Structures are given as structure tokens and as C-alpha cells.
Amino acid sequence: MAALRLETCHVACSANRTPNVVSWGRGGTLAFGTCNSVALYEPQERRVLSMLNGHTARVNAVRWVHKDDGAPETHLVSGGSDSRLLVWAAHNGKFVQSTECKGHTGAVCAVDALYAGPSILVASAAADSSVRLWLCGDAKEAECLHSLTFGGGFMMDVSLSLLPGTKVPILACGGDDSRVHLYVQSPEKQKLQRVMMLQGHEDWVRGVAWTSVGGELLLASCSQDCLIRVWRLRAKSGSGARAEGEQDDAVIKMKEDVFGLEEQEGDSGAVFAVALETVLAGHENWVYGVHWQPPTYEGGKRHESLSLLSASMDKTMILWTPDQASGVWMEQVRVGEVGGNTLGFYGCQMSPDACMILAHAFHGALHLWSKDAISGEWRPDVVLSGHFDAVQDLSWDPEGEFVISVSSDQTARLFTPWRSKPGGGRRPTWHEISRPQIHGYDMQCLATLGRFMLVSGADEKVLRVFQAPRNFVENLANISGTSREELLASDDCARLPEGASTPALGLSNKAVFPGDPGPASKDGQEKFSSVSDQYQEFYFQPVNMSAPPPEDDLLQNTLWPEVQKLYGHGFEMFCLAADSGGTVVASACKASKAEHASVLLWSTATWRQLQALPCHSLTVTQMAFSPDGAMLLLVSRDRTWSLWRRHQAGPEPDYGLYARTTKDTSVHSRIIWSCDWSPDGSYFVTSSRDKKVIVWGPCSKDQHGDSVAPRQVKPSSSILDVADSATAVAFCPRLCSDNSYLLAVGLESGRITVYGWRPDEDPAGGQDWIRYGETEPWQSHTLAVKRLRWRPRAGRAGRAGVSEESAWLQLASAGADHAVKIFDINAEAL
């Protein structure tokens, strides 16, 4: 039997919320830190190429090591909150960890690097108030050449370059003392010597960046004083250099500061001068990042274009260039966000051809603008997006066309494949096209009711029900390439609101129906009927989209209206489940006593509470309805599970206890994290912190003889030891050709393993389990897998009509590492 191949179809993630975490390579690949990983993203193809997993805490700084000839990079440096500095090298088309720089005792917050012969010179700044210089060669561990300490001060950014006409490295450090410190590496001792302090900024210096132009160096520094300063460093001739400023009093010149290099044998020592070139004022808030336009190479010749990009907390990026005639620096382009509930930009990058600019924002979002080749206008472009905190739960829609996820970042997000050119050869790429809910609480769970309704639970005592607006259905049809008539003809779409508006003083998304009146006015005079009417309400404007929306639209125009609130729980919501018919919703909250651990059942027809199911003594961690809705399974922190069966008598569903385990009969010795039903409803599976995965059953289908005493349902499988806490488990909805079941298990380490279970095999000795395969280290999550869900039907979303699609399965996973991942699995191997 061929080994199972798990191919990564999509990774939804966002940049970490730190300033130096994004770097654009000359080869066109964007590298950025996301949780504990470095993502390599291809903006042209709009897909994540790889994830570099090596850090054990948040990645704070990422930098490509650029080559002198502009060729694609083969080395990447990353620094994290785990105090580690890692150098990654290209090996057989993949990036692998090659060298580690050990020595910092605090979080690494900034890095830069350049080639020094065959080795790499790396500079790093960390929260231990130090800046270190490293030499990375072939050894696994780098050599620390020098360490600078700044007492109680911190350096926010570092930038390395070579002094003009020499091979001597110069290091610029911007710090919280409002100064820029310049250090030169002494050739003999290889130590750093401070040669100058550049003063002028009036607040913390947040970013520094060197560029080489015409044999001189320019240094840009940006600060919390909202200003950018550009300094020019040039070589001066000979020892008479210091007297140069006295020769012509009529000419006004900028004051130059001069420093010299140590004299070498047969060399009088070079002298360099630094002067302030210009001060750029245009931002209205702290400036966090500056980035020079990369040089281009044609026919082996280097062409330098003088252009500087800056990003600020005022939510704008500005492109600055000097005027050709006067040399005065001018603002050429300004792009950014208007409105929205976001804070500003942490950093910026420019593509190698200068036709794209990118900023990363406080909420992790990437913002990309592209220059129109004909008009020269800058327009928002499609770019990767994802959650910026742990993803707690996710669900497919019943047709398997899109995935909705909820996260501790207080948002619900909807991802679907985009067919950019119908009938074209380009593979569909996944994108976020709607943000149904933006909340004020960390979100924990969700359940989908049909295609266009969802129930969500957060760190509050209320459940909220949302319904998709008509505008979303139309945009889904445009972007995913499905028929609009088909979508709108379904029962769910009979009376859909047009969109959602957010009252100025309210928290709930309010439905807007076609023909609803706008703001109240009479004879041109506004009439205030209540205090809240005095505040402008955001009235929904339908947006017709044929491509995935940028962040601004996601925040304001893709909300779903809230149609119901459900009250009944006494503590924060923890898990939710809905039956396949969408008629019953089960909900559970955090509980430390039996009285709070009851599961509540709700009718989706009337939104009344149907009944409470008291059984467990601690939080119910997960629930699952059987495929036919006849059974409801609960697993709990109290290490037991309970099974409830639906009675047919009466108009409304009524569930009675059918089977349960107790402390004595429970096989699990630790908290049970997850559970799921087999596609035929005969068996169910539980997974626990005790590293055990167990299949239970079979569950009888008899509908009569509701005995008072609970039945006993026993393990049907041998105990599968997965060698790590099993945090998520899911049965594939399709049986294998030999009638065995396919099962995916997610672990606390972030790995996902796929097993086959054969009920007709003898459980003795574990012969009933087959291990088909697992995710590679670069495919795996770096933290616990929170939820696994198989696509409800065979084939890959967005690939309808492609031959051999029935051979494929798709698995979606949610991780505590902020990522939503979708895997393609070829079932023919089974």
C-alpha cells in the first residue's frame, strides 16, 4: 500500500504584531513571522510556499540576506522571543535551519545581515539591552564577535552596510535614547567601535536603514517624533578633510561630522563625513518603519533608484523621492486606510521591481498595493490574510465550498477558493472573503446551521446567531464561480437581509433589508427621537466584488447581521454543536461544578431552550451529534463521556441519557479533549490528554424500549497510543474501499496523523489500527491542533468539474499557532 501523501493546499495566517517581522526578497518571496514560524509567501502566485518551524516562541524579526548581484536569496535570518537567532539556508529547493546564534538572554527584536566572504555577518538587537555581532560560517553554532550593552536602554532596530570603497562593515542602531549610534568593525580585533552618535530626533528611534547610492551611503532613521531623517555618509580625501568647511564662507553647507578608520600597514587610514541630508515631515503619528527601493540589475550593471518608503501609526504609507531638478525630497505617493477600528502600520516593504508596496498592521493584516502599468495609479491588491491569535474552532459549510473559523483574536472569518480566471489554467487560491463577526470578546466555538447561518460562542454568557446577507451570497457566487441563481434558490435564502450595519453605540450587527429607510429626516431637517439617534450610524453600502476584498472592506462591508441572542448559561461559552438537519443546537459553558456543566439544547425554529442535559461535573469540552441526529455525544474535563438518545414521541426533540462512563469505567485517565462520529453512526471516537485514542460502539439503532438504566457501550478498538496529548480527532465522512474507517488525529505538538481503523480485525495487539502517514515538520502546526474537520464530500473545493476529483479528500485544521490549514489527501493511496 502506498504511503498517504498530505499536500498543503492553503495556509491562512497573518504577520506577528512586531515592527521588523516582514522582509521582501530580491527573488520576489515575502518572508514574515507568524506565531512561532516564518512563512514564505509568493505574492504573484498568492500562496504560502513553506513554513519554517524552528522557534519555540514568537518570531519578532525576519531578514533576507541580500546578494550583491540581486540574485534570489539563499539565506534568511530570524530572531524570536525564545532569545534565539536562527540562520536558514536553501537546500534542495527547501529552506532548512543551518546555524544558531546563542547568547542573547532576552527576546530578539531586530536583525540584519550581509555576506562577509563565504560567511554571513549578522547583527541583532534584543530585550536584554544588548546588540551583538555574529559570524555565521559552516558550523552549527555561530561565533559572537562582539556584544554591546546599553545599560537600561534598548535598541529598536539595526542596519548593516559596508563603508564606501572598503570591506569594513558599519552598523547603525536606533534606540530609546532618541539617537542613532554608528559603529565600525575594527579589521584586526573584529570588535565594534562607536564612531558617532547622530542627534536630532526627539523621541525613540524606531527604524534605521542603509542604502548605497553612487559610491555614498544614505541612512534613513524614523522616530516616534513623527519625522524621518536622512543622513549622507561619504568618503573624504586625505588628512586636510577637516578644514574643508572653512574655505568658502559664502556657501552655506550642512555641518559635517567626521570620523576616521584605524590606520593599516601602508595606509594612512580613510576619513568619512556624515551630514544631515533632509528631514521628512508628512506623517501625523509615530513612524515605525522605513525601507529603501531595492537596486535593479540589468546586464550585470547595478541601477540605483533613490526612493524611500515609510509606514506610520497614522495608517498611511508614503513614498518619498528627491526632485530631479532641485534635489528636494517630495512626497510622491500616499496610500493607506481610512476609518475602521484598526490601529496603524508597523512596517513596510517594497517589491524588487518597485511595482508593489506592502505594509503590515497592528492587527496582523498585510496590506498590499500594486502600481497600474498603464495609469501609474496605486490600487489595493489581493494578499494573504488570517487570524492573529489562537484559532479555537472551525467548520465547513454543508456543501464543502467554504470554511468558517473563530479565534481568540475576537473575529470569525470565512475562507473560500477564488477562481480568478474561469476556465483558465490557474489553480484556485483560497482567500478570506467575509468577516461575519467582529466581537469584543475572545471567540471560542461555532456551529453552522445550513449554508448561511451560524451560531457563535465567546468568553461571554450569550450565544449569538448570525445570518448571511444577500450581498455576501452574491459575492460568494462571483468569487467562487458558483451559480448565483442556485445559491439564492436554496431554502436558506428566502428572506435574506441585504447586509449589516453597526449602530454607533451598539455592539450587535443590525440587519438591513431592501427598502429600509436611511437616516431619519423630514423637510431636510434631521429629527432626533432618542439620544443614540444623534450619533451617525454606519449604513450598509452593498459592494459588488469579483475578487477577494482588501482588509478595509473585510472590516466594514462583509459583516453578517445578528438575528438572535440566546441567554441561559452562567459562565463563558466553551463548545457548540448542531445536528445535520440544523434543527437543534447544543451549547456548553465553562464549569467547575455539576450545576453549571449542564448542556443546553435550543430549537432553531423558535430559538427557545428545549431542555438541559445534566450529567457531567466539569466543563464539557466537545460535543457531536451522530450523522442522523439521533444521538448526542458529550465528552468532558471530568474524564468521562455521556451518550444521549433522541425520543421520537412529541413534536419537539427530547433527549434522554443512553449510555455513559463513570470514574471506574472510563478508560481515559486525563481530560477528554475531542470526539467524533463515524460516517455511518455506528461508532464514535474519543481522544484525551492521556495520549489515548479509543473507538467505542457499536451503538444500536433501536428506537423502542427506552430503559431507565443507561446501557453500556464498550471500546471496540484497541487503545491507540499516539505518544502525545491528542487534542483533536475527526472521522473521514467516506469509508475506505475495504470498509475500514479513516481517522485524523491532531496532537498538542501540532502534528496531524492519519490512521485507518478496521472493525473486523482482532483488537488484540493493536492489529486493527494502520498508520497511513503524518504531516511533515514544515507542514505541521507549531502549537496544539485545536480542531480537525474533513470536507463533507469528496473532492477539493473550487475544483468542480476537474476529472479524478473523487480521488481527493480535504482536511481543515485550526491551530493555537494562529493558522488555519487545509490539506489535500489523495485517497487512491488507500
Image (spheres, rainbow, N blue to C red):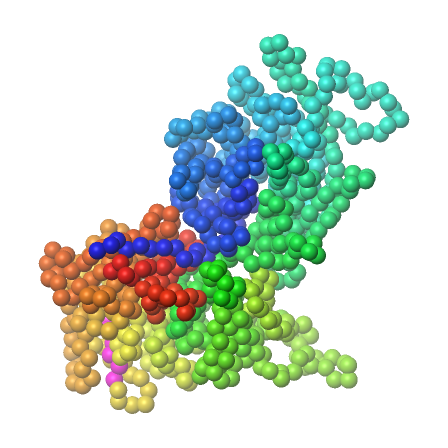
Choose top left, top right, bottom left or bottom right for residue 270. top right
Rendered residue at 26%/76% (across/down)? 631
Residue 386 in sight: yes
Does the magenta-highlighted stretch encompass residue 120?
no
Image position of 451 with respect to 17: above or below: below
> Left or right: 481 with respect to 328?
left
Rendered residue at 63%/26% (across/down)? 163
What predominant SS class does the magenta segment belong to? strand
Where in the figure is residue 388, as x and y percent of width and height? 48, 55
If the image is split into quadrants, where does the C terminus sit? bottom left
Residue 301 or 253: which is nearer the viewer? 301
Choose top left, top right, bottom left or bottom right for residue 405. bottom left
Rendered residue at 49%/30% (across/down)? 120
The furthest residue to the top: 266
Residue 661 in sight: no
Residue 133 or 660: which is nearer the viewer? 133
Residue 664 or 688: which is nearer the viewer? 688
Where in the figure is residue 84, as x and y percent of width and height? 43, 37
If the image is split into quadrants, where does the N terminus sit? bottom left
Where in the figure is residue 556, as x and y percent of width and height? 59, 67
Image position of 494 with respect to 207: above or below: below
> Left or right: 330 with respect to 175?
right
Q: Which residues are magenta?
A: 640-647
Does the magenta-highlighted stretch encompass residue 643?
yes
Rendered residue at 18%/86% (across/down)? 704
